[in-house]
Image (cartoon, rainbow, N blue to C red):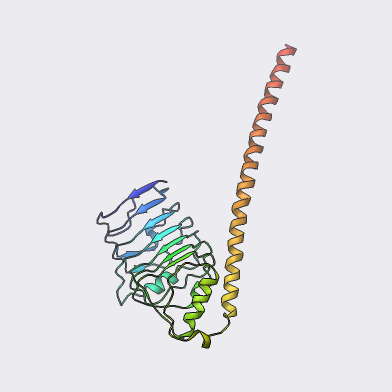
């Protein structure tokens, strides 16, 4: 992968002097305070972006619109203050159209999980070190292929104490690795069904993922066939041309 190491380089903005086809940028330990719409527009091939240990306080609504290839985004250890609603900044990024697989929001002083919408490719979600985070199972309905939720050193809170058990059952039932929550309510008194809206969002997410897999499989089948057709056509043209030359030489 084509990459740029901008680690600890005192950048206050995302540099615009890098190759436009760059795939990895490490901007950890810099002094970036905000991400505006034009900062990432020229890096359409970007797959991995490290923005941890910065001073990011705001993210523009369209900041990641052009990031259709982004797979790993690390925005942990940033200085979101009480006057900055980073939750709204992240939620405004929906719909996330990139095949995002790893999302790092560790030690960001989050007080609530962001609603990421339908994100079928997200496998790893790190929220370690956020002291008091409000959880809700509906926030996970659209992350249908989540394999690991890193919630170490994170204190979970719930508007409804029974929601704690609902989330535990939801994650366990889908094979997600996570650290169990300290549910205050008794499990016997919290036997409630999953909301129909959450089930619908989950099913839509699965359907979207299956479509992505089908498209990927079609590419692996169609692309070689197209290449083969081109090669055969090229060989046919060469053979035809050589035969025509032979005929021409025989008549002279």
Q: How many marks?
A: 0
Q: Is residue 213 above or below residue 239?
A: below
Residue visible at 60% across and 79% down in the picture: 196
In depth, the one of 47 and 251 nearer the eye is: 47
Location of the C terminus (image quadrant): top right
In depth, the one of 128 and 21 nearer the eye is: 128
Residue 5 in the figure: left or right of residue 218? left
Residue 231 in sight in this render = yes
Q: Which residue ends up furthest to the bottom in the rendered image? A: 189
Q: Which residue ends up furthest to the left in the rendered image? A: 10
Examine the image and state in which quarter residue 133 appears. bottom left
Residue visible at 27% across and 57% down in the picture: 11
Q: Which residue ends up furthest to the top in the rendered image? A: 252
Residue 30 place in picture, x, y as percent? 27, 59
Residue 130 place in picture, x, y as percent? 35, 73
In depth, the one of 97 and 172 nearer the eye is: 172
Residue 18 in sight in this render = no
Q: Is residue 54 above or below residue 6?
A: below
Residue visible at 47% across and 60% down in the picture: 101
In depth, the one of 121 and 95 nearer the eye is: 121
Residue 218 in the figure: left or right of residue 4? right
Residue 172 place in picture, x, y as percent? 52, 71
Residue 19 place in picture, x, y as percent? 38, 47
């Amino acid at each position: 992968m084509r990459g740029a190491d901008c680690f600890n380089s005192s950048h206050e903005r995302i540099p615009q002097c890098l190759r436009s086809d760059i795939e990895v940028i490490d901007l950890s330990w810099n002094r970036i305070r905000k991400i505006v719409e034009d900062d990432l527009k020229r890096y359409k091939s970007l797959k991995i972006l490290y923005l941890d240990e910065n001073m990011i306080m705001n993210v523009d609504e369209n900041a990641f619109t052009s990031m259709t290839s982004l797979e790993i985004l690390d925005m942990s250890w940033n200085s979101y203050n009480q006057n900055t609603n980073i939750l709204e900044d992240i939620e405004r990024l929906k719909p996330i159209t990139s095949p995002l697989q790893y999302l790092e929001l560790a030690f960001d002083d989050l007080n609530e999980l962001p609603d990421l919408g339908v994100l079928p490719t997200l496998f790893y979600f790190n929220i370690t070190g956020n002291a008091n985070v409000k959880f809700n199972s509906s926030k996970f309905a659209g992350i249908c292929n989540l394999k690991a939720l890193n919630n170490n050193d994170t204190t979970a809170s719930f508007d409804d104490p029974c929601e704690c058990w609902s989330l535990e059952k939801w994650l366990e039932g889908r094979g997600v690795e996570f650290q169990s929550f300290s549910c205050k309510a008794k499990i016997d008194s919290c036997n409630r069904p999953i909301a129909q809206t959450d089930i619908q969002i989950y099913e839509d997410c699965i359907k979207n993922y299956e479509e992505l897999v089908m498209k990927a499989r079609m590419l692996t089948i169609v692309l070689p066939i197209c290449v083969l057709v081109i090669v055969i056509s090229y060989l046919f043209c060469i053979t035809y041309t050589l035969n025509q030359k032979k005929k021409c030489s025989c008549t002279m």
